[in-house]
Image: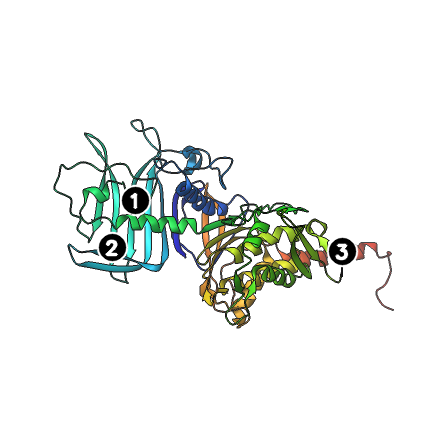
Amino acid sequence: MLRQLRLKNFKGWRDTAPVRMAPLTIFFGTNSSGKSSIEQFLLMLKQTVNSSDRKMVLYPGDANTPVNLGSFTDLIYGHDVRNKLEFSLLWELTPPLEVSDRRSNLNVSGDQLEFSASISGGNAKYPYPFLYDFRYRLLMNAAEEMRVGIERNEAPAGVQYDLKASPYKLVRHKMRAWSLGFPRKFYGFPDEVSVYYQNADFVQDFSLEMERLLQSISHIGPLRSKAERLYSWSGGEPEDVGYAGEKTIGALLAAKGRRLGAGKGKRSKSLQELVAAKLQQLELIDAFDVKEISKNRNEFEVKVKTGGSASWVDLPDVGFGVSQVLPVIVQCYYAQPRSILFIEQPELHLHPRAQAHLADLFIDVLSSRENGEARNIQLIVETHSEHFLHRLQRRIAESSSEHPIVSSQVAGYFARHADGESRLDPLQFDAYGAICNWPTNFFGDTMGDLREMSKAGVLRRSAQRPQGAGTGP
């Protein structure tokens, strides 16, 4: 689970400052305030990990990737390549990472890992982005930690990278002091580390933990695919439902053997049964089913029953909101344990009551279980929904066994643009769900509108009353 992140000089962000990430993290904000940039950054890191080019420090993307951020000049703050891109991530490790060295009898274990890096946009001598340094910090307890990383050294003989560790002492083999090769992407140690050092094999475990973190991320964009009358599925198991939800039905079919519970003590169901139940709780449909058209055709149709109807109809024949929220529900339960899910504007095309029910859905996801074990899903949601927020506040205040959530499980932020840069204001939830510092009139001035409506009504009625007419009987 991601616990904290910080970005410097990325798109509109000069500095986000440390951002606490909770099991449910919510971003609000005005349009073009930079709130989407945070998830874009993490998706860029993930697609860099997936890239086959080991020398590419960052992969901003192309037309076939979840995000396409253009060139380094496009993504750096102020489009000024003299600015250095800096970032840090802190996350939990399950199971803990163990490091041992027989030479020094070192045997340590840590359950949190922090990664920080800085990337330069280049200069006259090196006119391309390059990694300046990165560092891993394994946290063992409140007072102990272990650090290992690499640092760029522009020596007279050429660019070199030096391996640094503390308090761990690295021992080189007795041979010619060759310099290390270049790092792999933004996070990987040079391959020569394990060859040149007698006790540095463990560093690749740190790189592997970074890959695991980023591979656990999935993302659902704000515009999902429209419903189809027929869906093809050849039997594969998709990684997720896809950025636009295009793999939703394939994910449903691939998960036939999985049984999940919506919360501790709740009866486990198949994924299809669980999805149907959640669609009912959102008050969108009465029944839901995925049926194979005929044997060996690998084609399926999605049938639903709407409120009060006895007839099954195709998914495209019901309201657009059903097809738009379906990928969100499926991904929430299809995701593997300890996944991190970014969801943009899940409330689109849903009526206000259904938007409120979304908060209950996400609370259930946080407490969901599989094979008797907590799934520990992390949800990072970008939304504009007032109804979603108010239901969440109500559940925090109630703190009931039916929808168990407390304020410490929620982190909320309001993004805004001021003085030429994006800024992030942490929202202060108290133990009873109240927000102590909510931005004035972000959801509009409801009371002010009602007051002005009443005043306007009085003035219009007065103007329309016949002259000289009394007010008495």
- Which residue is denoted by mark 3 in the rendering? 459
Q: How packed is label 2: few (under 14 Cα within 10 Å), some, or many (20 or more)?
A: some
Q: Is residue 348 visible?
A: no
Indicate the amino acid at tag 2. Answer: Met
Query: Residue 36, image x and y in percent?
Result: 50, 46
Residue at left offset 73%, top offset 57%: 312
The image quarter containing residue 176 is: top left
Residue 231's x, y, as percent? 63, 47
Residue 155 at x, y percent in the picture? 20, 33
**Looking at the image, which is closer to me, 470 or 135?**
135
Query: For the residue labelled by badge 1, is the local secondary structure a helix, a strand or a loop?
Result: strand
The residue beneath circle 1 is 134
Please give the count of numbered marks on the rendered protein.
Answer: 3
Q: Which residue is mark 2?
A: 146
Disc nearest the viewer among 1 and 3: 1
The CA span between labels 3 and 2 is 72 Å
Q: Quadrant of residue 111?
A: bottom left
Residue 430, horizontal then vertical, whole percent: 47, 66
Which colouring convention does the figure follow?
rainbow
Viewer-closest of 254 and 466: 254
